Amino acid sequence: MGLLKRAAGFAAAAVMASAIAFAAPKIDEPAIWTIQKPNGTTITLFGSVHLLPDGDGWRTKALKDAYEAADVIVMETDLTEMGNSDVANYLAKNSLNPPGVTLTKLLSPEQKATVEAAMDKAAMSFSSMEGYKPWFSAIQISVTYAVLQGFDPSQGVDKAIEADGKSDGKAFAYFEKVREQLDVFIELPEDEQITFLVLGAKEILTRPDEMENLVTAWATGNVEEIDKLMNRGMEGSPRLARALLADRNARWTKEIGEFFMKDKNSYLIIVGAGHLAGDESVIAMLRDEGIEVEGP
């Protein structure tokens, strides 16, 4: 659920926060990984939660040291691209249903009832999403519900590190373009989009504290729990899970091995925490390539 919210960060700007919030967990020691490169420089990997309650207790000494040492900060994508008119037009074009097609027409009565119930939980009206494709509706519900729980897209780790880095004159690199992230959803077949929407709605109804549980696991460095929560949220849509996680992890691992490992720069890599947990994570793939990675 957390990773989906990250991919949907662009939608949160339209959401208004409310007074409903949860007790933020104590930040103990989020997991961090380090690669000692043969030339003496380092690559550090740190998992981001992209919507957080207010506060910066996640700035541990290990992360601060890695930030100071980094010649280049690497992130999933440059979110400032969302302000570009080309990207905004691309999103508008690909998030709307064709003329005459509504969300009601795409869903069975049972599916619609489930989605409507989740929208009620998120203080949304079903009619507000009638014109949008299922993938965009799913993201909007998810982000809106998270914000109602007290999570703030402006407080995410990646946003904070990016702001600091630009202020301090750090160099940046990005694994993907924003359009590439959007295309993960846009290119899903319609039936997969509907599955994504309905599963997300069911998760809100049956596991309303899932985002809080994910943040707690991240805050305490519980990588196994992060993996369990991420996989549980994606198990009903294996094609989306592969497109969002495993395939991207493989591309990023290849870039790290072929480029970052071979130059003289030290890197701080900040990506969603779900990309660093589990058997198909960036960490696991790097180790499978014979790269020694210190950390859990």
Image (cartoon, rainbow, N blue to C red):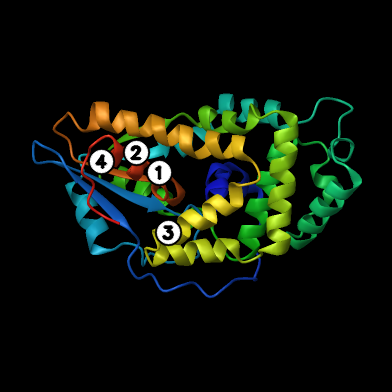
Q: Are marks 4 and 3 in contact (CB under 8 Å)?
A: no
Mark 4 or mark 2, which has the lower sequence index? Answer: 4
For the residue pair 204 and 150, the one nearer the viewer reads as 204
198 is higher (above) or lower (below) than 56: above
> Which residue lies under the disc numbered 4?
170
Q: Which of the two labelled residues, at mark 2 and mark 3, occupies the earlier sequence position?
A: 3
Q: Secondary structure at mark 3?
A: helix
Q: Which residue is mark 1?
A: 281
The reply to whether the C-beta atoms of the residues labelled 3 and 1 are less than 8 Å apart is no
Compared to residue 193, the image places residue 209 above or below, namely below
Query: Could you tell me how far apart the alpha carbons at marks 2 and 3 are, in whole angstroms?
Result: 16 Å
**Residue 20: quarter of image:** bottom right
Q: Which residue is mark 2?
A: 285
Residue shown at 70%/32% (left/top)?
Answer: 95
Disc 1 and disc 4: Cα gap in Å? 27 Å
Label 3: few (<14), some or many (≥20) within 10 Å? some
Q: Nearer the viewer, residue 14 or 200?
A: 200
